[in-house]
Amino acid sequence: MIEITSPQDPRILEFTQMRDRVLHDHNLVVCESEKLFLQFIHSGKTILKTFSTKNFAEKYKLNNDTNFIADKSILESVAGFKIEFEVLFLINKPNDFELHDLHNRIILLNGVSSPENVGSIVRSAAAFNINSIITDEKSCSPFLRRCIRVSMGNIFAMKTHHSKNIREELSRLKELGYTILSTANIPRSVDMATYAFPAKCVLIIGSEGHGIDHDILDSSDVILKIKINPQVAHLNAANAASIFLSHMSLVV
């Protein structure tokens, strides 16, 4: 193990100075927490580099030249806030799946740019056994460090697909036999409580500010809504997604 005494040390550049987007360009992802670290160790996946407290490194016998240690105050300086975890680690970003390799039930994010919402939606999807997710050009990556933290690492148990042309790919999903379900609280939408979800479907969640793009709404097979107090009008995207996902999970 190698001791680090300054957060500016170039040997920990990936943890301190490289933004998520730059890391992704290099096919890299930074994760944190002992629980997620153990998941990767037990799954046999490769961890490229660790940055941890000395106690953590000794506990797991991390003693080669890719294991860096520092006082917890330096880790907190790197994280930018007071932390409970004792390790950051670097991995290769998982490869995307092709559309035809995704599960029969998929959640698709259209313009969901909040890492907190994306992470929460991933966690809810995993909880309800919806294990495939598509993100479009306007949604943030579920592999951002903040998204991973909020999702409790559940994104690594899911099949992911990042779309560069969501409209073409929605057409392709229809060809593959998927029913396209949009979500919007508008007059022509169907009450989710009365709807029988098909076994093979894609559930689209839009952004809080603008909702689902109008042309995507118009091309959907069904538009669903959650019946709520009209004084409220709209739910938070992550909260609404959780309710839709719970009903979607009842598909036999």
Image (tube, grey):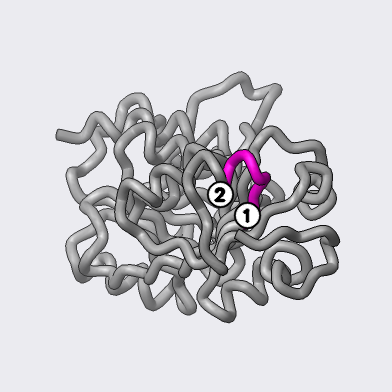
Total numbered labels placed on residues in the image: 2
Residue position for label 1: 145
- Residue 155 seen: yes
Residue position for label 2: 148
Q: Nearer the viewer, residue 3 or 24?
A: 3
Q: Nearer the viewer, residue 44 or 169?
A: 44
Q: Nearer the viewer, residue 189 or 4?
A: 4
* Badge 2 density bin: few <14, some 14–19, many ≥20, Cα 10 Å: many
* Badge 1 vs badge 2, beta-carbon distance below 8 Å: yes
The amino acid pointed to by label 1 is Arg
Residue found at x 80% / y 69%: 9
The amino acid pointed to by label 2 is Ile
Magenta region, residue range = 51-57
In this rendering, the answer to whether 84 lies above or below 63 is: above
Label 2's element? helix
Label 1's element? helix
In this rendering, the answer to whether 165 lies above or below 59 is: below
- Residue 213 seen: no
In this rendering, the answer to whether 42 lies above or below 185 is: below
Residue found at x 64% / y 38%: 85
Cα separation, mark 1 vs mark 2, equals 5 Å
Of the 4 image quadrants, the one containing the C terminus is top left
